Image: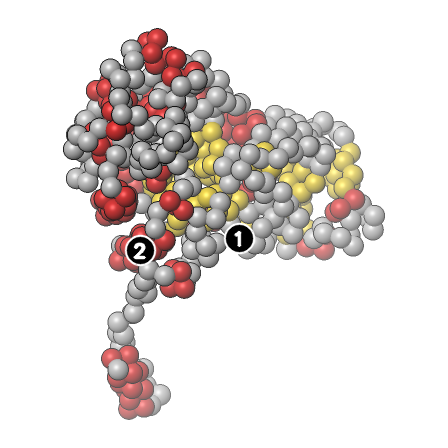
Amino acid sequence: MYKYFNLLSIAFLIACNGNKETEAVNVKETKEVYTANWESLSKHAETPEWFKDAKFGIYFHWGVYSVPAFGSEWYPSKMYIKGTKEYEHHRAFYGTQEAYGYHKFVPQFKAEKFNAEEWVALFKKAGAKFAGPVAQHHDGFAMWKSNVNPWNSYNKGPKIDITGELTKAIRKNDMKLITTFHHARNLQRNANNLDRWGAFNSHFTYHPNYDTSSKDPELSLLYGNISAEKFHQNWSAQINEVVKQYHPDMIWFDSWLNFIPEKRVQQMCADYFNHGVENNQEVVIGYKQSDLPKEVGVLDIEQGGRKDITERVWMTDITLSNQSWSYVKGQTYKDATLVMRNLIDVVSKNGVVLLNVSPKADGSIPVEQQKVLTEMGDWFSKYGESIYNTKPWDLYGFGNATASEGHFGGQSATVAYTANDIRFTQSKDEKSMYMFFLGKPKVGKEYTFRLLAKHRYCPHSKIKRLVVLGTDQEVTYDFSDTDMKITIPDIPMDSIATVFKFELE
């Protein structure tokens, strides 16, 4: 009735003023309100423009599990499972699991070298457009100032509001904030199982002699040894706490939402979307496998990528390190060349990359990781135009690189590309098209592309000129009905990926 009255009022004013200019009439805009059902939630735009344009973000696995720095971020789980290297390592260096439970690492997580502004400056220099923490991993330790979870970085360990400090630095640098949640599997579901040694449905093995079975009011919260009802309430409350305190532009879930009652998941999504509306934010939810309907969030493929262009924007989370997602002693890393070439492939297929780094327990980022991030940033400083604010072209590319299967679907995130592998993007206004050589093309060599013949894909009728991006060097090219020929000019080619720009009419 209110809206109907306003429309009648506007019509009356226009009629009374005839052809004269009318005074501005303010009509209160009705904001969307989302309710806890998939039909309502599907009305939310799952991929806002900022996310489509960003292409590259950084997050980090960093927490109490960084203290032992052994095995992986799954140390809290595997240290309790007989037969694992973590189990034996723990007994050798810290004592029995009965005497030295995971929670005893918390005071050693001091983060004394942590500097949020330095971290974010590095991430921005690397070319990331959004960044943020693993807010809570499977171990149940919250990396923010929490009133819900006593096991948090403000009350224990470093006694710093890690997420709060990072949020301030990220906003200061005009970047978007992502917070990720991995705590859906932290409920102790194994107490009544015959197999009490590492059943996968819970992070912590249940054993009556371990703290994982403790009924202590605090310990039981860390190890998930509480009722399902209380756990589910805490699961929601912690997400809502992060949303209300830090206003993340993206929240992301590492699987296992199927362990949470569907109605509670729907309510969480509705609360987040409604908070975004009230806060004038375009927010996005990331999910894995089939945890959410595709209309509600953005699908993430861990350590993998699509094999072709998709209509919907998607994401892959990959790690810079080779052994694990968290820092471990003796860690080795991918080089910038491998990471960047695979990133270009992702972007050409309508994807976004979320890259994981692995800080040490003291809050320092290893120099080897900093070096890779700096090299990535150097590439973006020259060729960022071809990545940011772009969209896929009609054809993602071609070449002869062999892509193995990814562990979680799609293709591997570590394909070895060469200059014989070509990828494409285009500007959103379609006035530019970018061609990437995923390697260093040989100066003077003539490349022949049959798929870019006149009668196929190439926009030959629109080309004003073809240049090497970042220079004013024009490139010699020739078209025929059967192919397109390009001669590599006599200027330095980029060792990671050289970009040629088609300037179009």
Task: Say which quarter of the image contains residue 419.
Answer: top right
Task: Say which quarter of the image contains residue 184.
Answer: top left
Q: Is residue 407 visible?
A: yes
Residue nearer the viewer, 316 or 113? 316
**According to the image, label 1 marks what residue?**
312
Q: Which residue is drawn at the image coordinates 32% and 65% (left, top)?
A: 32
- The label shown at residue 267 is 2
User: For the residue labelled by badge 1, is the local secondary structure a helix, a strand or a loop?
Assistant: loop
Residue nearer the viewer, 165 or 200? 200
Task: Say which quarter of the image contains residue 25.
Answer: bottom left
Q: As drawn, is 488 to the left or to the right of 57?
A: right
Quadrant of the snapshot with the N terminus: bottom left
Q: Looking at numbered disc 2 in the image, what kind of residue is underneath it?
A: Gln
x and y percentages locating residue 196 in the rendered image: 37, 28
User: For the residue labelled by badge 2, is the local secondary structure a helix, a strand or a loop?
Assistant: helix
Q: Which residue is drawn at the image coordinates 31% and 55% (left, top)?
A: 267
Quadrant of the snapshot with the C terminus: bottom right
x and y percentages locating residue 96 in the rendered image: 29, 13
x and y percentages locating residue 272 in the rendered image: 31, 52
Query: Image height check: is 336 above or below 398?
Result: above
Residue nearer the viewer, 101 or 391? 101
In the picture as drawn, the residue positioned furthest to the front comes out as 194
Q: Which residue is drawn at the image coordinates 35% and 88% (left, top)?
A: 19
